[in-house]
Image (cartoon, grey):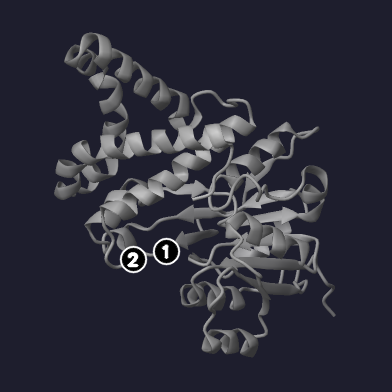
């Protein structure tokens, strides 16, 4: 008779209920046996961060014995993580986003086995090329530079043992609402004594999730601006909380410095200052359009040199707001 291996609570914050169903079905279909034949007990929990869940959706969850936690008010991503973690039955907790779909039936199994050794295990995340290529112009403008690149993003598919929360605390939902909580959590892990390592899951070529970032119909220029503002604000709040830790990280100081120098230069030297600063503005734009060049997306190649500086300025102003207010709230 098989023995019971370490069980796991899977927590999924949900803002758009119907969007989560594909990922939930894939999670329900995961292999529940270790390589030694041990049975893995799984608690699957949805943390609803919306006040208008569809009754059909709630019935769909109940039919599949998925635990539901309804937030009393909209708490944001960090707050939903914490609600799920506090109410998790088991010591091993895996967080996964509503639009992140596992590509292997062994993802949860391998993460659970890795968590026997490591306190934090990250599944790899991929924004697939085939999804981005179906986007409209403005969604491509926002996400094209991230397409086809594997990364580790804390929270999108991350296993954390409860002992980590007991040691460094939960996600900072007072400072970060919808972005930045991952950067802050990683920083606190690095500053712990001893530091808490964050490792990639075994067999990363197969153990990853596809981040099926919703393209969104009717996206426009303001959609891009709002997203970039959200990220910029998070970077600024992070920098304040950690006393400008990781100088140069996220380009906050670089962008703020360019903004200040540009303002001073225009006041004293006029357009000469802008010409002198042009290379520093163009370099990050050139880096950002590397995917456009690789895939030959001509509209992006033509438009980004004009839109890129606007995005850069938006992120900079948002970062300054986040820095001086000390919060990410957007």
Residue 269 pos. (x, y %):
22, 9
In front: mark 2 or mark 1?
2
**57 displayed left or right of 78:** left
Identify the residue position indicated by label 2 in the image: 216
* Residue in the picture at 75% in, 34% down: 195
On the question of residue 229 being in view, the answer is yes
C-alpha span from label 2 to label 1 = 11 Å
Residue 292 pos. (x, y %):
24, 45
* Residue in the picture at 57% in, 26% down: 246
* Residue in the picture at 52% in, 84% down: 54
Say few, some or many: other residues with alpha carbon within 10 Å of mark 2 (under 14 / 14 to 19 / 20 or more). Answer: few
Q: Nearer the viewer, residue 320 or 275?
A: 320
Identify the residue position indicated by label 1 in the image: 212
Element class at badge 1: loop
**84 displayed left or right of 220:** right
Residue 20 pos. (x, y %):
51, 73
Q: What quarter of the picture does the N terminus occupy?
A: bottom right
């Amino acid at each position: 008779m098989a023995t019971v291996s370490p069980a796991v609570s899977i927590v999924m914050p949900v803002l758009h209920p119907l969007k989560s169903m594909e990922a939930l079905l894939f999670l329900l279909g995961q292999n529940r046996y270790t390589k030694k034949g041990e049975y893995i007990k799984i608690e699957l929990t949805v943390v609803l961060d919306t006040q208008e869940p569809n009754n059909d959706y709630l019935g769909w969850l109940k039919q599949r014995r998925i635990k539901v936690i309804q937030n009393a008010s909209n708490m944001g991503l960090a707050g939903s993580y914490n609600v799920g973690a506090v109410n998790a039955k088991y010591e091993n907790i895996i967080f996964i986003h509503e639009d992140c779909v596992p590509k292997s039936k062994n993802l949860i199994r391998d993460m659970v086995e890795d968590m026997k050794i490591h306190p934090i295990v990250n599944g790899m995340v991929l924004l697939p090329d085939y999804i981005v290529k179906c986007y409209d112009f403005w969604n491509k403008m926002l996400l094209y530079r991230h397409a086809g690149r594997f990364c580790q993003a804390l929270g999108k598919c991350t296993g954390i043992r409860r002992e980590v929360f007991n040691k460094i605390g939960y996600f900072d939902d007072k400072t970060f609402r919808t972005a930045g909580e991952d950067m802050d959590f990683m920083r606190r892990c690095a500053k712990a004594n001893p530091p808490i390592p964050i490792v990639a899951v075994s067999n990363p070529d197969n153990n990853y999730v596809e981040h099926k970032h919703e393209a969104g119909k009717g996206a426009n220029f303001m959609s891009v601006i709002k997203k970039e503002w959200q990220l910029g604000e998070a970077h600024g709040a992070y920098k304040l909380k950690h006393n400008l830790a990781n100088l140069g990280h996220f380009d906050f100081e670089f962008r703020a410095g360019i903004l200040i120098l540009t303002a001073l230069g225009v006041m004293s030297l006029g357009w000469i200052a802008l010409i002198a600063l042009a290379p520093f503005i163009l370099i990050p734009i050139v880096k950002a359009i590397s995917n456009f060049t690789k895939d030959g997306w001509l509209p992006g190649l033509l438009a980004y040199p004009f839109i890129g500086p606007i995005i850069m300025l938006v992120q900079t102003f948002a970062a300054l707001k986040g820095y001086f207010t000390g919060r990410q709230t957007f």
